[in-house]
Amino acid sequence: MERVVDDMVMAGLTPNAMTYTIRITGCASTGRVDRAMELLSLMRAAGVPPNAYVYTAVITTCTKGGEWEQALHVFEQALAAAAAAAEAGDMERARSMVTTVTYNAVLAACEVGKQWEVSVHFPPYDLPASNFETGANMAVSIHAEHGQRNAKECG
């Protein structure tokens, strides 16, 4: 994939968010958190704004690489980008920064990191009720599973 992107640039084509998403998703299969973060930085430096697909791919890569704290940091970046877009009056862009899939990806990171306490404190951002319900159900599931493990360990 790296060569394809290099060839695109040499041909005068500009990689877009989808191109970066594909590259970052490739990092998830190998647990290359460092490379996913580097690609996110390169993307920004190239003036390509990340979207929910990019943020979700980076969060997923962090989770698969065992870096749940880094996944939370990227999620916070996505929330900050959404807030900045909303403040600028671009509600469409704001809503495209964080989706149910992004939210569920960061909840999965909390599950991997056994951080259910963190998962229940996420801000309820502007998602349709059904989307938030999906994420909330996952948070409850993480909490319940953690509670069951604690009961087994203590009992």
Image (spheres, rainbow, N blue to C red):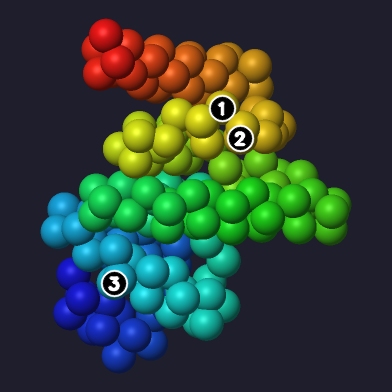
The residue that label 3 is drawn on is 35
- Tell me if mark 2 has few (under 14), some (14-19) or many (20+) residues whose alpha carbon lies within 10 angstroms of its own: some
Spatial distance from mark 1 to mark 3, Cα to Cα? 29 Å
Percent position of residue 115, x then y: 42, 35
Of the numbered discs 3 and 2, the one sitting upstream in the chain is: 3
**Residue 87 sits in quarter:** bottom right
The answer to whether mark 1 and mark 2 are in CB contact below 8 A is yes
Label 1 to label 2, Cα distance in Å? 6 Å
Name the element at disc 2. loop
Considering only vertical position in the picture, is 83 above or below 11?
above
Q: Which residue is mark 2?
A: 122
The quarter of the image holding the N terminus is bottom left
Q: Earlier in the sequence, mark 1 or mark 3?
A: 3
Left or right of 41 in this view: 1 = left
Label 3, label 2: how far apart the Cα atoms are: 27 Å
- The percent position of residue 57, horizontal first and vertical second, equals 36, 51
Tag shown at residue 120: 1
Look at label 2 and name its amino acid. Phe
